[in-house]
Image: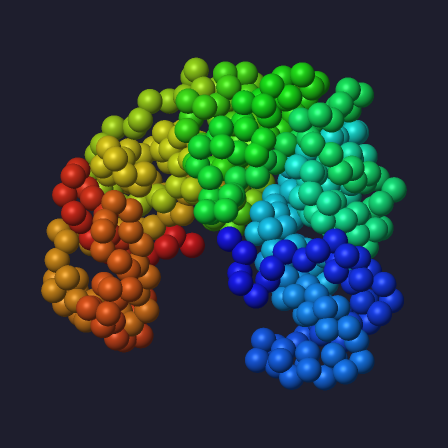
Amino acid sequence: MNAPHDPQPSVTAFAALLTAEGAALLDAVRDVAPADELAVATRLRREHPADLVSAALAQARLRQRAVAKFGVADAARMFFTPHGVEQSTRTSVATYRARRFTDLGVRRVADLCCGVGGDAIALARAGIAVLAVDHDPLTCAVARANAAALGLDDLIEVREADVTEVDTAGYDAVFVDPARRGGRGRIFDPEAYSPPLSWAVAAAREAPRAALKIAPGIPHEAVPDEAEAEWISDGGDVKEAVLWFGGDAPGAHRATLLPSGATVCAPRAAMLPDPPVRPVGRYLYEPDGAVIRAHLVAEVAARVEGGLIDETIAYVTSDAAVPTPYATAYEVTDELPFNVKKLKALLREREVGVLTVKKRGSAVEPEELRRKVKPRGPGSATVILTRVAGAPTMLLAHPVR
């Protein structure tokens, strides 16, 4: 939901930011700290319209928030709405997806539900001509301004329209990013997306190629049989899932890890069964979240010659140290039943002062455990709270470098 101090601006208020006076104000408030906003606003309102000053300050806040997704250089030139910052694709992910389109020979894309234009920008930078469509007048105005600000307006046509009524014939591909948030927050039912997933799938089936951006938690049974389902993480965090139609791996599950671009893919019909449960070995592997979401833990376990520590926990254990981009490896030094006093004594004995707490299958909060054991000393370690063959367990370990 929007922050109370960042209301959605009007089209008129936004248009004023594109004037010379608006540009000068944006430059003047670029680095204003939140604590200084009131004083700065009071001073600027002596020479500029109050609404324009408020719009400039709000835009400066949005640009600061957008840095995490768009980087400093682009965020400083682009324009945003509160919805746009929240729902935009991270640039690294959008760039990767655009590269997949170009690898498939796509040169013209209809970007339906384009938002403030983040995906259209990535597509245009890959040399693809884009029809960017959204039904909201303000969103379209912002998308046009962003295309112009980044020098891409010759490749991006922004159209205000109902995406369900747009004729995409003549385009090599369609990209659909349905709205997955409503007035009460995140939407989990794909049929409650705007437009619904069923409409997006129907539109994808009519196009030569298509990509549908969906929530990573989509039920696997909702994935059409002919679509490749790809889960994408960036820096270890799962960012999105994409359904690809007309691609090179129909009916497959894929996990892609950015920034490396490492990818593991398996046809749904030939995915490996869950690996067997086995005792904890010398090494523990924590699969990337995209691997887990794609149900490809078994493929990673096979690569490291490992098995599960519990049938319900996505931790893989092995006696072999096998380098893999798909999981973080730890060397296990101790395995003990869950007992805070024993852990505290062991950490004191090892002089562990820097303690990383990880958990999977445990209700204990890391900060709560850290407060109880009070780590002190020059050493460091990782404690993993989990279950081993159903029993609450603590594993003391060190990352494998």
The relative height of residue 221 versus residue 330 in the rendered view (above or below) is above
Depth check: give the residue in front, 396 or 41. Answer: 41
The relative height of residue 382 versus residue 108 in the rendered view (above or below) is below
Depth check: give the residue in front, 35 or 286. Answer: 35
Indicate the position of residue 57 as horizontal and vertical percent values. 68, 70
Quadrant of the drawing holding the C terminus: bottom left
Indicate the position of residue 207 as horizontal and vertical percent values. 69, 19
Q: Which residue appears at 87% of the width and 67% of the height?
A: 20
Q: Which residue appears at 73% of the width and 41% of the height?
A: 120
Q: Which residue appears at 35% of the width and 43% of the height?
A: 285
Depth check: give the residue in front, 268 or 345. Answer: 268
Q: Is residue 187 left or right of residue 371?
A: right
Quadrant position of residue 313 = top left
Depth check: give the residue in front, 158 or 247. Answer: 158
Indicate the position of residue 192 as horizontal and vertical percent values. 49, 32
Q: Is residue 183 visible?
A: yes
Q: Which residue appears at 65% of the width and 84% of the height?
A: 39
Q: Is residue 112 left or right of residue 253?
A: right
Q: Is residue 259 visible?
A: no
Quadrant position of residue 56 = bottom right
